[in-house]
Amino acid sequence: MKNSQDRAPIAEALIKNVSKRTVSFDVPGHKQGQGNPLLRSFLGQQALQYDVNSRRDLDNLIHPTGVILEAEKLAARAFKAGHAFFIVNGTSAAVQTMVMSVAKKDEKIIMPRNVHRSAINALILTGAIPVYVNPGIDLNLGISLGMSVKDVALAIEEHPDAKAVFVNNPTYYGICSHLQAIVDLAHAHKMKVIVDEAHGTHFYFNKLLPMSAMAAKADMSAVSMHKTGGSLTQSSFLLIKDDKDTNRVRKILNLTHTTSGSYLLTASLDIARKYLALNGEKLFNSVIALADYARQEINEIDGYYAFGRELINGDTIYDFDTTKLSVNTGGTGLNGIEVYDLLREKYDIQIEFGDLGNILAMISMGDSTAKVERLIGALDDIKDVYAKDSILLKTQEYIHPIVRLTPMEAFNAKQKKIKFKDSVGRISGESLMAYPPGIPVLAPGEEITSGAIDYILYAKAHGSFITGMEDDSMETIKVLEV
């Protein structure tokens, strides 16, 4: 097999397969678009001709021996990993596989509380016990930060039987913990390190960006290639450092991974990997410069603060991803959700999210100076037209969890519905998240506090979308029976 990164084996095999003009009596039923003219008109014939089943010459995602295995090995080299698995169930599947690979029922895993919901769901699936490390908090910006190394060290000291440490690299806002120090510390205590790099694909392809998980010698990493790497939505990589673990991890991955892997998604991963391996350094140099320009211009507008590397403190903010254009809106008297809505509804600009205190615009290789200028102009106009008297807005705050049962125990326990406003002191049977950013405020097995209730109700009243409760009206919540 060639070592060159200028190949895309899956895409090449698909092109060759189509050229054979094979008569199809297998699935999918649309038969390369011929059976559904409405779908063909919407997506186009070229896309649908590549939406095929796992044929012999196209290999099989759950047990690859041909072109998919070749593509996996090329991806591993590009990411400097032991092996790379193609993920078509979204990065959530990769996160769940990581947790299931390092911790079984009643085994402990150290993690920050500001993890994505997929990590909490993995605890429900495995029965693992979370040991939460409280992330740092920036009270002025209203955002969670990274984990302090001393707090990780304390958690390891108090829980020497923990099997692994879970790290976000970076957070949604671009904040990075001291990953290398955490990896070294965990490994010194015979613990694995698994890393959620959903927003860190680009770290692997530019030396000006923060350190990647594989560079830090972490054991596993979940990488959302579709977020900043240019592949199709829902496609990701699961990276492992030791290739000797390949068969074991694949067996765990296949517990939840689809047996009907989309060739549109796998080919997009293959092509995106090729493109970044050949052009990533130059591409992300441009992205960094564009984001820095936007940050500088936005900071010239009264009421906004586009924060960046000046926040670095060597601990809870060890590094910062400058491609994340995170902007605090508090000085305009508008919360981030209001600015998000105005940008979309009045200016036809779609950003990644707005929370109670900030907005986030993702700057990527598909952006241009003209697009960024349009965003800057819109923010300036919003400040002039819609700004209110600057007030102290309640921003995203960290709710300290009081864990009474493991997420699995609570999820499977007998539950009943009670009035949400009367649930203080009870044990939650549900996960409650405010979107954005999708970090649980309550997880199954945690005691419901007045602070959690106040925050959720405030977030909903100010435009956040609350998920996780069966009762969409939020009048009732499921709690454990006493």
Image (cartoon, rainbow, N blue to C red):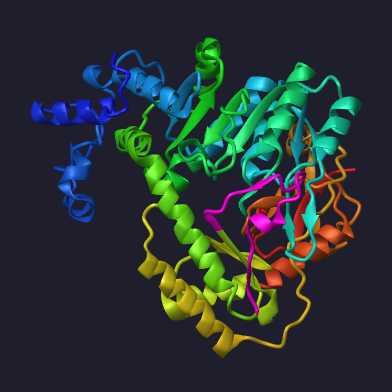
Inspect the magenta stretch and tell me whether residue 417 lies in it: no
Q: Quadrant of the C terminus?
A: top right
Residue 72, position as x, y percentages in the image: 39, 22
The residue located at (47%, 20%) in the rendering is: 83
Q: Is residue 119 above or below residue 425?
A: above
The residue located at (62%, 86%) in the rendering is: 387
Residue 442, position as x, y percentages in the image: 77, 50
Q: Nearer the viewer, residue 191 or 277?
A: 277
Would residue 170 be seen by someone viewing this image from the given angle? yes
Please report the bounds of the magenta region as a residue range: 303-324
Q: Is residue 386 above or below residue 422?
A: below
Q: Quadrant of residue 264?
A: top left
Q: Is residue 137 above or below residue 110?
A: below
Q: Quadrant of residue 350?
A: bottom left
The residue located at (46%, 81%) in the rendering is: 346
Q: Is residue 351 left or right of residue 170?
A: left
Q: Is residue 49 above or below residue 327?
A: above
Inspect the magenta stretch and tell me whether residue 312 lies in it: yes
Would residue 124 be seen by someone viewing this image from the given angle? no
The residue located at (46%, 72%) in the rendering is: 375
Q: Residue furthest top?
A: 244
What's the magenta bit mostly, secondary-structure-wise?
loop
Q: Quadrant of the N terminus?
A: top left
Residue 17, position as x, y percentages in the image: 16, 26
Q: Nearer the viewer, residue 363 or 18?
A: 363
Q: Is residue 50 left or right of residue 336?
A: left
Q: Is residue 158 left or right of residue 21?
A: right
Q: Nearer the viewer, residue 374 or 18?
A: 374
Q: Nearer the viewer, residue 287 or 53?
A: 287
Q: Is residue 99 left or right of residue 4?
A: right
